Structures are given as C-alpha cells and as structure tokens.
Amino acid sequence: MTMPVGPAPVDPAPKNGRRPRKKLHIVQLIPNFMTVAALCAGLTAVRFAIEGRFGLAVALIIAAAVMDGLDGRLARFLKSESDMGAELDSLCDLVNFGVAPALITYLWALQGMRAEGWIACLIYAVACLLRLARFNIGNRQPDNDSNSFQGVPSPAGALLVMLPMFLAFAIDGGQPHATGLVALWMAIVGALMVGRFRTPSFKRATIYAENVSFVLLAFVGLVAALLTYPWTTLALVDCAYLCALAYSFIKKPRPANEQAGPEA
C-alpha cells in the first residue's frame, strides 16, 4: 500500500515557545576580545598622534598588528571561528591599518599641504578598503594561495606608509622634510596594497628543529633593538620588507602551463 507523500514532519516547538540557546565558553570569546582590543589600540593611536606623541601612536599600531596576527590563529585553536568574528576582524583592520596610519601620517607631516596631503590620505585609506573588500570576497585569501599574497597586506602597508616618519625620527628627531614626497609615498603604498603581484607570506614558514635556538636568539635581538633603537629598527624592518617585495616581483612564478612541462 502506497502512503501519500506529504510535507516533512516539523519538530514540535519548545514548550515555552523559545528555541534552545547555544552556550559558549568565555574562553572562546578571547579572539573577539583581542580584535576589539586591537580596534581600541588603533583609535587610541590617533588620539596620541593628535597630542603629538607619535612614538606611542606607532607603538599602538604595532600592538594592533600583533593582535591581528594572533586573533585568527587563536580562534582556530579554540574552534570558535564565526562569520561575525571574520567581519569584526576585517572592519577593525580598516580602522587600524587604513584610517589610523593615514591620520597619524597626516598629523605628523601633511597638515601644511592642505588639499594635497589630504588627498594622499584618502587614496591610501580607500586602497586599504578595496584590498580588504577583495580579501573578503576571495574567502579571506584573494587567490586561495596560503604561501603568498596578492599585493601588500594591510598590516604591512600600515608600517610601510609610516616609513618616512621612522626615518625622520631616526635621523633628525622627527622633523618632517619633503612633505610632497611623503604624500607621494602614501599613494604608492596604496597602489602596492591593491596590486596583483605576489608578495611573501610568512604564515606557513617552516624551519628545521635544530635551528629553533637561532630563531629565538634572532627574535630576542629584534625585540632588544626595538626597545633600544625603535625608529632605526622599524626603518630597517621596512627596508628589508621592501627588498623582499622587490625579490618576489623579480622572481615571478612561471605560469602553470610552463611549470607542468611536456605531457608523458
């Protein structure tokens, strides 16, 4: 006997008319706490720049970059990844690495230029926005290649755009010079952020186990240099990254059809 086909049975509603609520451990919210803390650091960096305390402003941008690098990994480790967390991270990145560095640089060197300096700030901030939008559309990795990026990532762009400031404080006590070049540099960094060329990614870099001690010593040396000669060290780190970009641009990977070789 054939039974009539009808709609699928519906689970009865809870007695109190409410759906069961999902519980989360407080520990699973730590990545979101870090994301919000990074946003607070970026906004506070702007405040310190308004007060002329550019050293503290740069330190907070670096702190925001460190927290940005850790919150995603921590979310995966705690199995607390969510769409909301991903959107929070992207929105905070726009403020921390797009808006805040642009305003800090403007307050440091470009106020006297008026229109030209502000246009450079807008170009850089909008470039950061476009990059993050492209990043989100591409499932948080534009080309799905975990070993490299397309264009300069936003945290690196924030440090690069402040390179003139690092050099000025390292050489001449922070007095801005050649403000027109500073504005031009902001526009160039914005173009690097939305570029389609390969840039190195260190997220999955590996080392041999026997070299761990050397890496730890190098890290200690970097931290000591940052604490002792912060401006010079930051300028050198930026220059090293620019050299890595140049090397990646020169050593472009061959197209896939050339790498495959002749068919068997």
Image (cartoon, rainbow, N blue to C red):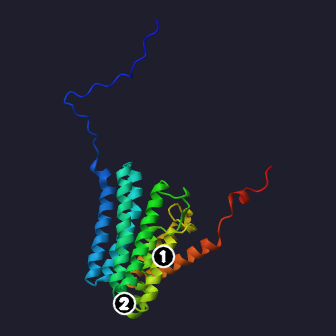
Residue furthest to the front: 115
- The circle on residue 189 is 1
Query: Neighbour class for label 2 at 10 Å: few (<14), some, many (≥20)?
Result: some
Q: Is residue 254 above or below residue 114?
A: above
Q: Secondary structure at mark 2?
A: loop
In the shown orientation, is residue 233 left or right of residue 147? left
- On the image, which quarter does residue 172 sit in? bottom left
For the point 26% across and 38% down, which residue is it? Answer: 21
Secondary structure of residue under mark 1: helix
Whether residue 61 is visible to the viewer of this picture, yes or no, is yes
Q: Nearer the viewer, residue 244 or 9?
A: 9
- Kind of residue at badge 1: Val
Foreground label between 1 and 2: 1
Q: Residues within 10 Å of mark 1 (few under 14, many from 20)?
A: many
Q: Position of residue 26 (x, y in %)?
A: 27, 50
Q: Residue at x 29, y 80 (%)?
A: 49
| Residue pointed to by mark 2 | 174
The reply to whether the C-beta atoms of the residues labelled 1 and 2 are less than 8 Å apart is: no
> In the figure, residue 89 lies in which quadrant?
bottom left
Mark 1–mark 2 Cα distance, whole angstroms, equals: 21 Å
User: Observer-nearest residue: 138 or 262?
Assistant: 138
Residue 168: quadrant of the picture = bottom left
Query: Where residue 31 sits in the image (x, y, percent)?
Result: 34, 56
